[in-house]
Amino acid sequence: MTKPIFTRREMLGMTSMAGLATLTGISSDAVAQPAQKRPRIACLVSYWGATRSHADWIITKLLDGYWWQGAHTPSRVDVVSVYIHQHETSLLGQKICNAKNIPIFKTVDEAVTLGGKELAVDGVVIVAEHGEYPTNLKGQWMLPRWWIYQQVIRVFEKSKRSVPVFNDKHLSYNWDEAKWMFDKSRELNFALTGGSSIPVYYRKPEIELDIDTPVKTSIVVGGAEDEGALFHCVDVLQAFVERRKGGETGVKSVQCIRGPETWRWTEQNPWAANLLESVRKRFELKPGHFQQIDRPNVCIVEYNDGTKAAVFSGEDVGWTYAGEIEGQKDPTIISMLGWPGPFSQYHASNSQPHWITETMVTKKEPFNAERLLLSTGIVAYNMESNWENGRFSPLGRRIETPFMNIKYRSTRGAQFSTGERPPNVPYIRGFAS
């Protein structure tokens, strides 16, 4: 298949599984099968040309191991092939693959068949988060996640078998593409995972909501200035609210409000104002702290069971969840703060590669893929909300989402990292410099 032509622009900046059996993070299933063959993984990426690219954060951990629960954990998978869409500018990826004798194939098909005619790997990792790709009028970064994924699906269908797939961050900027991606995972019966690294970040306090917690209302406060940053916040929200009493019932509507109207809406909705104020007080910030942000916005989510939630763009609180729990006087506040380790240890990408590895080893989803689909949909329709017939309005329209009538009950346990954070040591990629 001929590669689609993308307009080039300057790359954007940084934007239950069984109990944790040991400090290495190996699941009880994996412990029971010590002689299990190491899964062979194909890594399909958009761009791998900088140490700040998600491909470098994630794939190097799959190659060399990762920091989990206060200790270094050796890799339990073998990366056997790589495809890079923007190959010419991905010099770092080329150098790493050359140092580790990993072939870089020219097409997705060749990477997952190892140059043959049928599927020849045990798992697929898609990391299409960086590169020079256009942004549409609504502010959605048109990364080629679906384009890569659908080529993998064609190989699955041709080979009459499938393997687990990880897709970094949201499935697509487009709901129809995302729903197709999810549906294919069910049709072809393979584990699908992905999403943000923040739900498995270090937490303060180190707690998880119990299953069937009677959550009434929720907010998340964090950097949400654009689509990519918003997804992290929404995925954090979904990781908490999916554990509410009765389980997930699906999303009824989504609305985005930007600019000063953000605070007018907040004043008119005391439940949101009270939770936001509880976060401010927890961090001992000055009154009006959040109202001073340059580009305020709020993503408003209504669920089919009447639960309400909102994501506020805010500073100086990391990513913080605050929930009103029935029967409790004070809100439950859980924060994901700071870097999980020194920059030499690559930002958030330690806990996430643990769960990628668990997916590839056990062939089971670490959390319901329905959560990934809902997070994707909320972000997509948040970006749609402020636009209608090509015209922008800061007071976005409320979009009803009956097609997001997705129900499930979470059964996972706590998945976030605990213990000491990684030491500040140079990261070795397989070559001197």
Image (cartoon, rainbow, N blue to C red):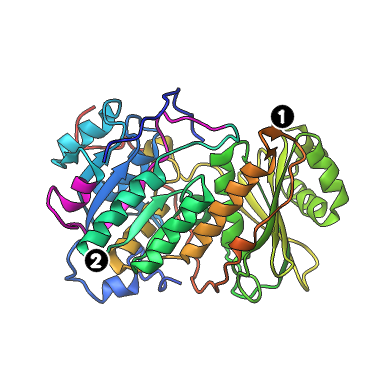
Query: In the depicted view, which residue is nearer to us: 184 or 103?
Result: 184
Residue ID at (46%, 65%):
367
Q: Which residue is mark 2?
A: 161
Query: Where residue 294 is drawn, which disc sits there?
Result: 1
- Assign the C terminus to one quadrant of the image: top left
Residue 320 position in % (x across, y down):
64, 50
Callout 1 amino acid: Asp
Query: In the depicted view, which residue is nearer to us: 370 or 187?
Result: 187
Secondary structure under tag 1 reads loop
89 on left or right of 283: left
Residue 134 position in % (x across, y down):
47, 30
Residue 53 position in % (x across, y down):
39, 35
Task: Give neighbour class at mark 1: few <14, some 14-19, many 20+ (Cα, 10 Å).
Answer: few
Q: Which residues are magenta?
A: 109-136
Q: Is residue 24 visible?
A: no
301 on left or right of 104: right
Looking at the rendered structure, the number of numbered marks drawn on it comes to 2
Task: Give neighbour class at mark 2: few <14, some 14-19, many 20+ (Cα, 10 Å).
Answer: some
